[in-house]
Amino acid sequence: MRILITSVRGKTGSALADRLAPRDDVELLGGSTDPARVTRDGVVPVELSWDRPDGWARASAGVDAVFVVVPLRADAPELVASYLATTSASTHVVLLSERDPEQSGPQGWSSRVEQAVRTSGRSWTVLRPGWFMQVMTDPRFLRDQIVGGELAFPHAEAPVAWTDVRDIAEVAELALLDREHAGRTYELSGPQAVLHIRTAELLSAALGRPVVYTEPGAEEALDGLTGFERELTALTYERVRAGHFAVVTDDAPRLTGRPARSLEAFVADAAAAGEWSSP
Ligand SMILES: NC(=O)c1ccc[n+]([C@@H]2O[C@H](COP(=O)([O-])OP(=O)(O)OC[C@H]3O[C@@H](n4cnc5c(N)ncnc54)[C@H](OP(=O)(O)O)[C@@H]3O)[C@@H](O)[C@H]2O)c1
């Protein structure tokens, strides 16, 4: 079976490649804007950029199933619809969406992406995960401040049921390989909603030095963000405040047959892998 991951170097894409690359029954194509940087064994690099529609059909040729990572751009619903039109009609699409899509992004942005997939004429499975634990090891998000001894996150009073991308990858693997998941929508979360002050305690214990929780104001939390990404992030923090990311679901344990990975396990694994060891 030939499977394409649209963003194989991203957090979810790389976790999914960890599962699919070793399989003998899968030929894995890894999409990237810079295929030369796709160096993982068992992944065939392919150029796939949301900015270069001329390459979409080539990247997806002969693909039986595709894992679609949605770009954080206002035109994502239209891009995803146009991209899927270049795939074979028999392609199965597994979409990485997010929780409460009707409230995510301006003008129902996330719902419109889902709608583009549901009306594509392809069979589909939609995954709706909560906030990823791996933003804590992503240098574009929380990693560097954690290394510096701080966890700054809005809304001290609002717990988050952080989701491990390895659980998302495990469910995505099932959905890509078995059409019994076609037409299904899965809500994915971690096993427990955790207050940020507790998250900082877990990080402190794992790092062996203090990581202090601080609560930024609304403007401070959006520092450095502009345009669509700023609007999307502001709405997402508002959903944190409203408790949307505190909801614990049972789809991942039901599908994988074991409990969702805990924040404790993620922090221990990331510390052991040296994710926070260098500046
Ligand atoms: N972060 C969360 O907590 C969270 C929660 C729920 C849902 N989501 C959803 O998850 C998605 C992000 O997934 P992720 O966090 O796994 O990804 P990610 O780590 O943010 O990586 C995104 C990837 O996009 C690729 N990329 C950049 N520009 C591109 C372009 N012009 N065309 C094609 N690819 C491009 C990059 O790879 P190359 O450099 O190799 O091209 C990068 O690896 C978003 O749709 C978001 O809404 C996120």
Image (spheres, rainbow, N blue to C red):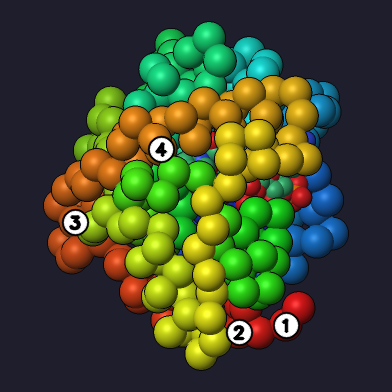
Instruction: Kindly tell me whether mark 2's CB lies below 8 Å from ligand 1.
Output: no
Residue 136 in the image: state x and y as whole percent.
Answer: 55, 62
Callout 4, which amino acid?
Val
- Residue, x 74% and y 35% (percent of image)? 225
* Mark 2 or 4, nearer chain start: 4
Callout 3, which amino acid?
Pro
Q: Which residue is mark 4?
A: 240
Mark 3, Cα crowd under 10 Å, few <14 / some 14-19 / many 20+, is some
Q: Which residue is mark 3?
A: 253
* Mark 1 or 4, nearer chain start: 4
- Work out how far the residue at label 4 is from the one at label 3, CA to CA, in angstroms: 23 Å
The numbered disc on residue 278 is: 1
In this view of the protein, can residue 163 be seen by the observer? no
Does the CB distance between marks 1 and 2 fall below 8 Å?
yes
Callout 1, which amino acid?
Ser
Callout 2, which amino acid?
Gly
Seen in the picture, residue 183 relative to 148 is either above or below; the reply is: above
Q: Which residue is mark 2?
A: 274
Query: In terms of image quarters, where does ligand 1 lie?
Result: top right
- Residue, x 43% and y 84% (percent of image)? 205
Pick the residue in front: 265 or 146: 146
Does the CB distance between marks 2 and 3 fall below 8 Å?
no
* Mark 4 or 3, nearer chain start: 4
Looking at the rendered structure, the secondary structure element under dot 4 is helix
- Work out how far the residue at label 1 is from the one at label 4, CA to CA, in angstroms: 30 Å
- Work out how far the residue at label 3 is from the one at label 1, CA to CA, in angstroms: 34 Å
Residue 28 in the image: state x and y as whole percent.
Answer: 57, 55
| Quarter occupied by residue 240 | top left
* Mark 3 or 1, nearer chain start: 3
